[in-house]
Amino acid sequence: MGASVGFFGGAQTVTGSCFLLDIRGTKILIDCGMFQGLDHDKNYQKFPFNPEEVSYLLLTHAHIDHCGRIPLLVKEGFKGDIICTKPTAQIAKIMLLDAAKVMKEHYKTLYRKAIRKGKELPPPPLYDTYDVIKSFCHFRMLVYYDTPVLLKEDIKITFRNAGHILGSAFIEIEDLKENKKLVFSGDLGNKDKPIIKQPELPKDADFVFMETTYGDRNHKSFEESKKELLEAIVETFDRGGNVLIPSFALERAQEILFILREFYEEGKLPKCHVFLDSPLAIKATQIFKDNPEFYDEETFEIFVHEDPFDFPYLEFTEDVEESKTINNFKSNAIIIAGNGTVSGGRILHHLKNNLWRPECSLVFVGFQPKGTLGRNIVNGAKKVHLFGEEIPVKAKVYTINGFSSHADQSELLHWLSSFPKVKTLHLIHGEPEKMEVFEKVVREKLGNKIEKILMPSYGEVLELY
């Protein structure tokens, strides 16, 4: 008996990452993420495996599509160890507490509507705050980059810097008995980004499981994207409007603050009010400040002298009443609020107040999965429904993809080209059409290095050796 892997999320989709590796009966889960967008209903299905039989959960990073079902896993019987870096553990805990709160509020809203209309009641939240806190005791092992750990005498793991978000990793798993190595990429980072260190390059592997979120395209350069953002801000203020930036609380919000501080210090940012209107993003920013050892050299040098994420125009709005007062600002305000896909959070209230105003701008700085309101707006929706009202989309819509924390096609190829030879490349965490583009490019550019390329589907279990 050798090894097999089951694809129970992140298979031909960009959310819900969850892969079950079985090495001679030792079951190791790599990520346990929440499904979003069109795949949301899969969150309510039973796990296609027995959580009680899983000994380890290796967590690549703390985005909710990689960690969001951990409390559910524990609720359904997982008793093993969660292994990750220190920042990943810190961030995952605040992300999961927030997820429980959001699900509870969403359930209350749906419940009231169902009662009012005499319809079938919605399913209860996947988990509550108690379930989240209960899961924290499973974060038993915090690891450092490039430091091997023996899970058993014949299974070794090593976390390497993926350069995606603070504490993110790709994971090497070595079967010492069979002399086989597997690499799970997690999400790989965009190497031009500020704040955290550049992604490491892998050395060798027999089996590679690789994300393909942007496998079909290359990003604009980071500098180009900064220029686009500044132009969007200046043009919007010239029209007498506000700039709305739907942002993921983790990494993207901190990057935008970092960039706006740069603009301010260079004298490029017009006088304005900048609101970070997200309690979760505010907590995440504090975690960033607590982990400067993960910064790149440039950001660390700034940190020695000043706060890289602060400047005079910036205001943190934690409570709801503070958030409501932002609506009094009709111009020269930059509002950064969650969530990043416009599928919930305080950004919806700001859209209701600004989306119909042609002088305002809506700036997307992150990937919008299929089935989300953000994707619909990017695709040209003329009207959207918010809080029971139909709101026309009159604000100018910008999509700036150079801020992505995901590697683009060229960077994915660069990372993959570091392997001297790969027996099987499994393309994961991507939409099928993007995978197909990436597969074609890999065959053209690296065909001599890759023996076989697979695009596993959800629920598929493959024997590796």
Image (spheres, rainbow, N blue to C red):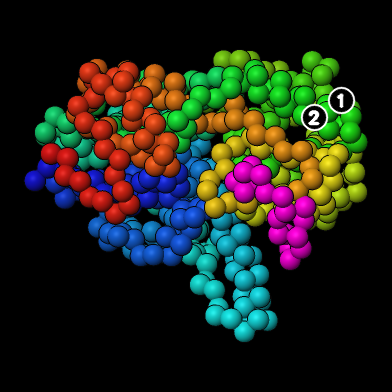
Amino acid at pointer 2: Ile
Q: Is residue 203 above or below residue 253?
A: above
Residue at x 51%, y 37% (from the top left corner) = 87
Amino acid at pointer 1: Pro
Q: Nearer the viewer, residue 119 or 418?
A: 119
On the rendered structure, is 307 left or right of 207?
right
The label number, if any, that marks residue 339 in the structure image: none
Residue at x 86%, y 50% (from the top left corner) = 327
Q: Nearer the viewer, residue 139 or 403?
A: 403
Q: Is residue 419 above or below residue 237?
A: above
What residue sits right under mark 2 in the picture? 233
What residue sits right under mark 1 in the picture? 270
Residue at x 66%, y 70% (from the top left corner) = 109
> For numbered disc 2, what is the local secondary structure?
helix
Q: Is residue 280 above or below residue 402?
A: below
Q: Is residue 233 magenta?
A: no
Residue at x 62%, y 43% (from the top left corner) = 379
In the picture, residue 161 is in which quadrant?
A: top left
Residue 314: x and y, percent? 80, 34
Residue 7: x and y, percent? 30, 48
Q: Residues within 10 Å of mark 1 (few under 14, many from 20)?
A: some
Find the magenta span and give its range: 375-392
User: Is the residue under label 2 in contact with that under label 1 (CB below 8 Å)?
Assistant: yes
